[in-house]
Image (tube, rainbow, N blue to C red):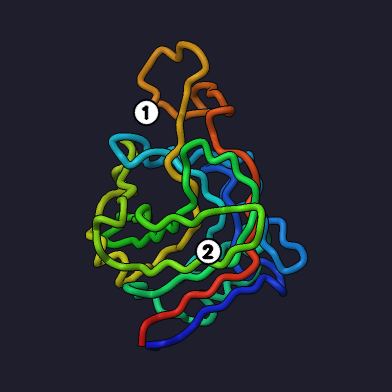
Amino acid sequence: MAGKVYHEAFDDGPGGWCGFASNALGPRSLDVRDGCAISRSPWWIDYNHAPPGAGYLHLLFISNTRGVYGEHQREVAGRCRFADGKFPTNFTNASVTIRARGELETRGAQMVLLFQATFEGICSGWMLTGRPFKIAKEWTEQTVTLDPDPKLWTCLDSRHDRTDSYGRHELGRVLADVNLNMMFILFPLTIAPMGDIGGDPHRLRPERDYPIWRSRLPEGYVMLDDLKIEWPG
């Protein structure tokens, strides 16, 4: 499998890529038109990794790497061309190239890659925070290499009440077998409660247990025209 190339141009639908509505609703459709996958705000706040985890994030583009999509996910994302093609799940030192544009009020967040794998029943996610993508109004092509240097990465870990599902596995182990999914996300997010919420905001869930100031969160859209993953070989 060394040297194999995954290429998604979105010319024939989403190719298995989708967004995410919420824990309750699950995946949501991306707007795919003219060979572009488009993700627009407002985005759900993923609170599964609230402190003492890494924090909150927006999920813009998601694809499974292995496994069979459920009926709802197939409806919104189509056939998963990555999983169907049995592309390698060892992402160590692979390169990811995107052609993208958009307009973002980032408000301190950056668009980064996230890879997740599950071992012994615990999902571990790592974000490539040391190599973010820049989104501009004009089309740009950008490439990042998935160097396994821990200094470039941030582990998601888990909020206080999700440790039965999320946790920490070593970065090297996760990159060597990304057996769950890959994502483009916005991180970090500023969660500002609207008024007195009567408790620790990190033990509660924003927009589910208390209102927040949406004006502190990223707004805009990202258009993903082309995506290529190349494995060393």
Tally of numbered tags: 2
Residue found 51% across the figure and 70% down from its top: 97
Confirm whether residue 71 shows in the render.
no
Residue 132 appears at what percent x and percent y? 44, 55
- x and y, in percent, of residue 23 in the image: 51, 43
Q: Residue at x 25, y 55 (%)?
A: 151
Residue 60's disc is: none
Q: CA distance from mark 2 to mark 1?
A: 28 Å
Q: Nearer the viewer, residue 25 or 62?
A: 62
Q: The residue under label 2 is which amino acid type? A: Ser
Q: Residue at position x 53%, y 64% from top?
A: 63
Q: Is residue 212 above or below residue 26?
A: above
Q: Are marks 2 and 1 in contact (CB under 8 Å)?
A: no
* Rendered location of residue 70, percent (x, y): 57, 62
Q: Secondary structure at mark 1?
A: loop
Whether residue 55 sits left or right of residue 72 in the image: it is: left
- Vertical arrangement, residue 195 with respect to residue 37, above or below: above
Residue 202's disc is 1
Amino acid tagged 1 = His
Q: Is residue 178 above or below residue 232?
A: above
How packed mark 2 is, by other alpha carbons closer than 10 Å (few <14, some 14-19, many 20 or more), is many
Q: Secondary structure at mark 2?
A: strand
Quadrant of the image containing the C terminus: bottom left
Q: Earlier in the sequence, mark 2 or mark 1?
A: 2
Q: Quadrant of residue 22?
A: top right
Residue on which disc 2 sits: 63
Residue ID at (25%, 52%)? 168
Examine the image and state in which quarter residue 69 appears: bottom right
Few, some or many C-alpha atoms within 10 Å of disc 1 (few <14, some 14-19, many ≥20)?
Answer: some
